[in-house]
Amino acid sequence: MFHQLLQAASEQYGIAFCEFEILHKTGRTLVLAVKSLQGDYVLKSIFTSEKRLQFILEAEHFLRLQGIHIPEILPTLAGTRYFLWEGDRYVLQEKLRGVPFPPTTIEALTRRAALLGKMHSSSLGFLSKHGPYGSEERLWLSTYLRELSSLKDWVHWYQNSRASKKKMILSYTDFFQQAGQELVERLERHAFFKSWIDTPLHKHFLCHGDFHSDNILTVGSSLYVIDFEFIRYDYPSKDIARFLQGMMNRRKGWDPVWFDHLLNSYLRENPLRDDQLDLMFLDLAFPHSFYRFVDKGGYRNMSLDHVTAYLQREYDKTVYFLQHTKR
């Protein structure tokens, strides 16, 4: 299969690809590193609709023009940004000679936070003729309620469990359910949120959707962002929450000092008004991570000690953001 794909790509680009290596192969994407006499490239397919792919490529192009470093897309001989092979669409990208570098220092953390802030700020004004035609924030309230309902069902199902990990999780569920219900009520009456969801789409931020250290490559003195398949119109809290998960994994817990460094660096590139910042804190306070941990069974392959540490850090994080949102 892959040799036939490389032959098709060679014909599309006029480049004789001679070797390949599978970098990723999932139900969502196929990513190959391919070699030729002209150089090394990445051949990638995102298994999605043509309109969705057009949106992703247009968003990447827009951000490049604003100075965000993103791998370049090479055009085919016909001048298109992708080609069709056996029902899937493929793009050819430059292959970066860079590596992921987890932010283990304050300087590395703040530099990546600044990059995220610049990316969000730079995304304002983008509008694609291929859709989507609405922002994800319109789904927040229904998502909050669905996640709380799922937590309630989980508690009902396992409330009499004798398993040590489930008993530990159950000892935290009242707190997260009460916090979640309080945040639903705050969201329902949040004046800025109610006005924000009706704001024209081009005034909304683009959210990367998977902003973590593996998707940020250090190339010389520059930071490049890769893997935009989840990009969408959404609120900055979504990317910050994903970034925070990596920070907490490395710090082995919630660290408000490191978060303050992250936030200050982010806000220098993307200043937010008090009401905008309050909405961000509200969403960061909601127990999205705890819900996924429980609903997806993230605890199953963890030790009891690791489960306890995870629950404590999520508790500490939620308390912090609850204290920083308006009542």
Image: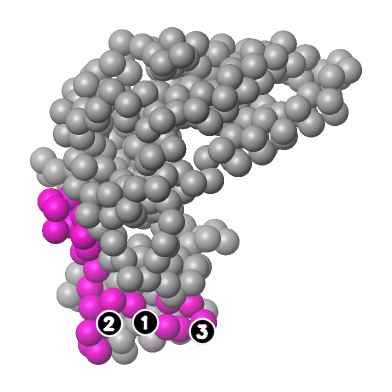
Residue at the spot of label 1: 83
Sequence-wise, which precedes: disc 3 or disc 2? Answer: 2
The answer to whether 29 is drawn above or below residue 181 in the figure is below
**Residue drawn 84% across the image and 25% down it:** 156
Q: Position of residue 19 (x, y in %)?
A: 35, 72
Amino acid type, callout 3: Glu
**Residue drawn 17% across the image and 75% down it:** 38
User: Can I make out residue 71 in this image?
Assistant: no
**Residue drawn 64% across the image and 16% down it:** 178
Left or right relative to 213: residue 301: right
Left or right relative to 234: residue 152: right
Disc 3 vs disc 2: which is toward the camera? 2
Residue at the spot of label 2: 80
**Residue drawn 24% across the image and 18% down it:** 261
Left or right relative to 139: residue 325: left
Quarter assignment of residue 142: top right
Residue at the spot of label 3: 86
Quarter assignment of residue 277: top left
Q: Position of residue 176 (x, y in %)?
A: 62, 18
Secondary structure beneath dot 1 equals strand
Q: Position of residue 237 (x, y in %)?
A: 39, 33
Please say if the residues under marks 2 and 1 sit with CB atoms less than 8 Å apart.
yes
